[in-house]
Image (cartoon, rainbow, N blue to C red):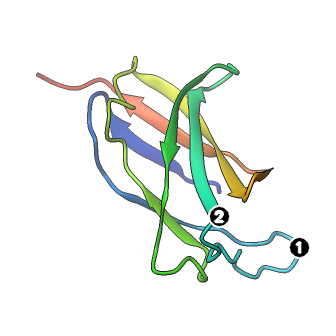
């Protein structure tokens, strides 16, 4: 996950779509079980304090490994700067954190 997601302080969009794959096989991660959930832990780069936990929605039934999320609920009510996100998959109480982190650049709003 090399790209940086660029956003603006206070925005609630865009909607981000992620496709989760198994690093060993390259296959998509099957998220179709009804008890499987995915979230993104949002925090300032270089820190360990989680500022927001963003719930993701499955695309379709989840079997294609895709989820979406947005920044609704004030997630981007933060100072401009660099942020990161851990992707956490919860399989009915057993958590797996995806090794690579998401990277965000939040710039100040104009006006």
Helix, strand or loop under label 1: loop
Going by the image, does 42 lie left or right of 31?
A: left
User: Few, some or many C-alpha atoms within 10 Å of disc 1 (few <14, some 14-19, many ≥20)?
Assistant: few
Going by the image, does 109 lie left or right of 58?
A: left
Where residue 39 appears, as percent x and y from the top left, is 58, 49
Q: Quadrant of residue 111?
A: top left
- Total marks shown come to 2
Helix, strand or loop under label 2: strand
Mark 2 = which residue? 36
Going by the image, does 16 lie left or right of 19?
A: left
Residue that appears at 49% across and 48% down? 55
Mark 1 = which residue? 24
Where residue 57 appears, as percent x and y from the top left, is 46, 62
Q: CA distance from mark 2 to mark 1?
A: 21 Å
Residue that appears at 28% across and 41% down? 12
Report the quarter where the N terminus lies: bottom right
Q: Quadrant of residue 26?
A: bottom right
């Amino acid at each position: 996950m090399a790209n940086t997601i660029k956003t603006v302080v206070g925005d609630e969009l865009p909607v981000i779509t992620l496709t989760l794959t198994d690093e060993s096989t390259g296959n998509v991660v099957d998220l179709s079980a009804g008890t499987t959930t995915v979230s993104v832990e949002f925090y300032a780069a270089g820190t360990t304090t989680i500022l927001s936990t963003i719930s993701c929605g499955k695309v379709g039934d989840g079997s294609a490994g895709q989820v979406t999320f947005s920044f609704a609920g004030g997630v981007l009510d933060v100072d401009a700067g660099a942020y990161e996100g851990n992707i956490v998959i919860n399989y009915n109480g057993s958590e797996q954190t995806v090794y690579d982190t998401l990277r965000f650049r939040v710039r100040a709003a104009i006006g």
